[in-house]
Amino acid sequence: MSKRKFEPLASLLRPTSLDAYVGQSHLVGERAPIRQMLAHDQCYSLLLWGPPGTGKTSLVEVISSQLDADLIRLSAINSGVKDIREAIGKETNDMFSRRKIVFVDEIHRFNKAQQDAFLPYVESGQITLFGATTENPSFSINRALLSRMRVFVLNPLSQTELADLVDTALAFLSNQNQLSYDFETGVLASFIDHCEGDARRLLMTLEIASDSASSQISADITSQGKAVITRQIAANAMGVKTLNYDKNGDAHYDLLSAFHKSIRGSNPDAALYWFARLLKSGGDIQAIARRLLAIVSEDIGNADPKAMQICLNAWDIYHRVGAAEGERAIAQAIIYTALAPKSNAVYMAFKAVIKDVEEEPHYAVPLHLRNAPSELAKSMEHGLNYRYAHNEPNAYAAGEHYLPIALAEKRYYQPSMRGFEKILSQKIDYLKGLDEAHDDKT
């Protein structure tokens, strides 16, 4: 009993073998890579990437134990390059020395210089580096280090795996406290749903609930040594639900991505859901509004020119009336954009133009399009034979060329046949007909 006062349940139940490890069967199951690695007494540098509570630290401890290796822990929060070098030491690869595994939790918090400090030790084989991260390593780990590590993805635990963990935890608590534990109907499912695949959160919540249930036994003469975790006890233990979110991390960009793709996919319900998730997770309304405007230019464009103004108006309303009513105005704009006709013609046209500007020669401006502010410029034929469109039939200089000669046949903007772009497409065809009629005459 005294031990539990100082060591959390999650720590007490930390597995000591792969057989006791819960979850990640794609890594530790039969013929899975980590089990095969240990079976052949091999060890290589690993990067374990997954959400909190998926067993990254436990897996590192199991591996180091089964390989009989020295495990050196480093904190990515308060360790500098000097600390890294001192912790690793200057031992050589003596054939009789034990394996040395250096484990860095939240390794993405190390800057580039700190990550580079590991390179010579990993390269020489002096250490095996294990890193754990909740962030996408493609963005948070420098390439030189990443190329020397094998990346394994850890997934949130399934409901079945969490239920197995509950059984193990209750058996341990029953043995520790000489009590039996039970759940009121439906409470266990609520526990598992609340934890969303996070084993650490599950065990912490279960520990709080079991302590509360145990304390009520002495006041209940009918309990007969059975501690019941009621709905009220469970609700108190679970507390307020917190959402997985980091405004500078993967969760932020994943939510924004789902929000963007829902609007592009013309699904207003999903778009509103991801908008609400962003808000309730503490997302910045400015970032959401900026993304909404980006969506309009990328995925709607001229198919509905009103969409841009509607989104700008919603953002303006938010600043004028405050969050409560302003969020509703942005929700209105989200529904409008989700149901607006879609076109990426502007996006594709501008992308193609940028590509040509970057890759093609910088062609000279045709003489008839050049500015002629002086007699010298005019004597050099700047602006010569320029046709002023307003003086032409239909205010259009049919057959005139405005692109450099080498690009004269390019057609960057290809409007869709949706929304207002259908009208723009008809206008382009009409102007093209005028050009062809002019060319036939000449």
Image: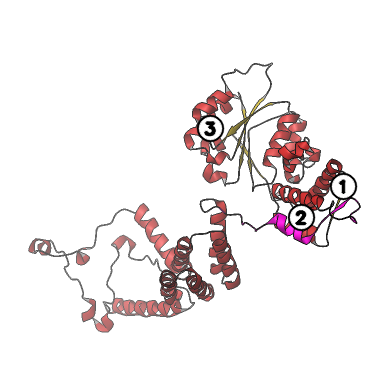
218 horizontally vs 62: left or right: right
Q: Nearer the viewer, residue 135 or 265?
A: 135
Regarding residue 15, the answer to whether it shows in the image is: no
Residue 439 image-quadrant placement: bottom left
Q: Nearer the viewer, residue 153 or 363?
A: 153
Please report whichever mark, 2 or 1, sits nearer to the chain's N-terminal start. 2
- The residue that disc 1 covers is 179
In the rendered view, would you say 252 is above or below 264?
Answer: above
Is residue 42 visible in the rendered image? The answer is yes
**Secondary element at image label 2:** helix
Which residue is pictured at 75% across the width and 41% down the height?
28
Q: How is the image coloured?
A: secondary structure
Q: Is residue 134 above or below residue 394?
A: above
Residue type, numbered disc 1: Leu
Asked if the residue at tag 1 contacts the one at tag 2, i.e. Cβ–Cβ closer than 8 Å, the answer is no
Q: Which mark is residue 159?
A: 2
Left or right of residue 358, residue 155 in this image: right
Residues in magenta, as a range: 220-246
Residue 125 % position (x, y): 61, 25
> 44 and 100: which one is in front?
100
Question: Which is closer to the viewer, label 1 or label 3?
Answer: 1
Q: Amino acid at mark 2?
A: Gln
Q: CA distance from mark 3 to mark 2?
A: 37 Å
Judge the density around disc 3: few (<14), some (14-19), many (≥20) Cα neighbours within 10 Å. some
Residue at image position (28%, 56%) is 363
Instruction: Using a 10 Å C-alpha cutoff, classify the residue at mark 1 as few (fewer than 14 neighbours), some (14 to 19) or many (20 or more).
Output: some
Q: Which mark is residue 79?
A: 3
Mark 1 and mark 3 residues within 8 Å of each other at the beta carbon = no
Provide residue 60's location: percent of width, then percent of height.
69, 35
Q: Secondary structure at mark 1?
A: loop
